[in-house]
Image (tube, helix red, strand yellow):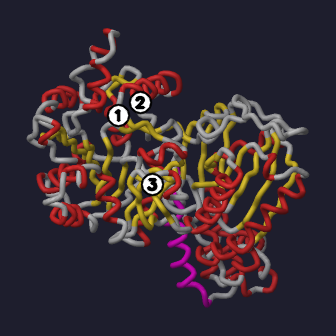
Amino acid sequence: MSTTFCNFWKHSWMLKRRTFSVNSLVNYQRVVLGIETSCDDTGAAVVDENGKILGEAIHSQKEVHLKTGGIIPSVAQRLHKENIDRVVNEAVRSSGISLHEVSAIATTVKPGLALSLGVGLSYSLNLVKRYSKPFIPIHHMEAHALTIRLLHQVEFPFLVLLISGGHCILSVANGISDFLLLGQSHDESPGEALDKVARRLSLFKLAECSSMSGGQSIEYLAQFGEKTFINHKPPMTHYQDCNFSFTGLRNHYNCLIKNLEDKEGMVLRGCALVLESLKIQKTYVMNQGQKMKAIILAAGYGTRLLKDLQSVNEQKLQDLIGIPKPLLPVRGFPLISYWIEALKAGQDPKDVFIVTNEMYYGKFKEWAKNYPSVAVISDGTSTNEERLGAVSCLQLIIETFKIEDSIMVIGGDTLFYEDFHLQDVLKNYDVLYQGNNEANLVLSYICKDEETKKYGIMETDESQRIQAIKEKPLPTDTSSRQACPCFYLFSKYTLPCVKEFLDEKKDAPIDEKDAPGHFLSWLVTRKPVYFYSISGRFDVGNLASYLLCNKYFQEKISKLNYLQ
């Protein structure tokens, strides 16, 4: 199981390939302010293009969380808010330059605790707006993988095992923007498992462990214990791959503790056994998540694109007339095929549905011969004037196939940059769903000022929940620049809302109920909707956007299943 992953430099801001004109800089051509709030430490640093740290500051929350035996997200959020301004100012001050001289601002946007990430993102976006600086969204596990090259002359390729409080990833770093994922934890991380076992043992009450984290406490006490006092084989070792699972081990030891907690020496011996099991554990668990159907909306008529194609003389482009946007060739493959290949990695093909119109139904059925299990239906319309609209097409699929599971809704003319990975989004949604089964998730990226009047713009709070969506506002009408592409994960408890929305809008003109954004704007006042940050998207609406998308894919994308 090999997929490409980890790419934050290539499509945010390439330090070694792209330059910004910053006339005020004297000593440093390019300098980045980095801000990190993914978990329980508030950190900031100013770094030049050669990797030299010019100034840094950090505030640790360790002592607070030790008292509760682990990190409480709401507490971590409050402490980030209280300290982020001081930490950033201290880092900038110690660097000897001003914020006006910074070339860009880089901030961790994923993965991590949503409440913590929201503090850093909100603070950074305010700085970006105030100082008119480029913004670099950072995947902090990717940053961990490359940090070694700041300290040592490590050549590519190299094998990297990333173990943190929230993750466990094994990958091969082939280059700055080229990572091969070999395996990862399909549930919780070893750090999380250790913290939970330590909390169950109340290790923070022991004098010698009072200033240690859960993992540190277990590691310390394990040296005095007996790792073989119980003969326990690591689970699922018969799977021949590089993935990890720690939830089963943690539950096993919690049960063991309950049965043996009255026996003398249990703590020391148990710690040794837990630590040894985590060291040798190598297993695979299928990413069950919660059951989900995928619906691709492809019933548009592409009127803008058709008008553009009819106005050009180039035969190669005129040959595209009559091809629906989702079937346009992108690097030689139909646009929609990128999504199907990505969905095949985690979806039963029988759970993928496409809705188109009568004009293009035959073309989609011909394309679907390569994917015989994918269901294709027509909305029954033959012209743009009689179109049902995307939300009505969504309801058509739900009713026709009697869907009762959660759904993934994908715009058939939408693709994302190469650092997008569907499995990361699904895992993020699984976490949300476990906390609130009515939660919904959409994607968000930062658009330019002049682009706000083209898209629906989200206004969010620090917990990454969407409070409102403004449809195509002027830049002066909102401080937000968070655009929302057509990709949504809707809880099964949200499905009845689709019909409710259409019933309310039954007498409204088509323009008020056509685009999915209208439904989303209506939904955020009724159900919890959160966002997941991405670096950007392609929305193939006219000829210029199609050519830009195709050019990007020809230059950057090498695999049909890159979206996985």
Q: Is residue 435 magenta?
A: no
Q: Given the image, on which type of amino acid does mark 1 rest?
A: Gly
> How far apart, in angstroms, are the residues tagged by discs 3 and 1?
18 Å
Q: Residue drawn 40% across and 64% down?
A: 529
- 17 vs 389, left or right, is right
Where 410 sits versus 496, above or below? above
Q: Are marks 1 and 2 in contact (CB under 8 Å)?
A: yes
Q: Residue drawn 44% across and 53% down?
A: 473
Sooner in the amino-acid sequence: mark 2 or mark 3:
3
Q: Given the image, on which type of amino acid does mark 3 rest?
A: Ile
Q: Could you say which quadrant of the image residue 11 lies in?
A: top right
Mark 3 highlights which residue? Answer: 457
Residue 493 image position (x, y, % from top left)? 27, 68
Mark 3: which secondary structure?
strand
Residue 71 image position (x, y, % from top left)? 63, 74
Q: Nearer the viewer, residue 373 or 313?
A: 313
> How far apart, in angstroms, are the residues tagged by discs 2 and 3?
20 Å
Residue 230 image position (x, y, % from top left)? 59, 71
Where 244 sits versus 527, above or below? above
Residue 441: assigned label: none
Sooner in the amino-acid sequence: mark 3 or mark 1:
3
Q: Where does the C terminus fall, quadrant-wise?
A: top left
Mark 1 highlights which residue? Answer: 541
Where 135 sits versus 403, above or below? above
Q: Given the image, on which type of amino acid does mark 2 rest?
A: Ser
Where 414 sits versus 550, above or below? below
Mark 2 highlights which residue? Answer: 545
Q: Residue drawn 26% across and 25% down?
A: 306
**Bounds of the magenta span?**
242-262
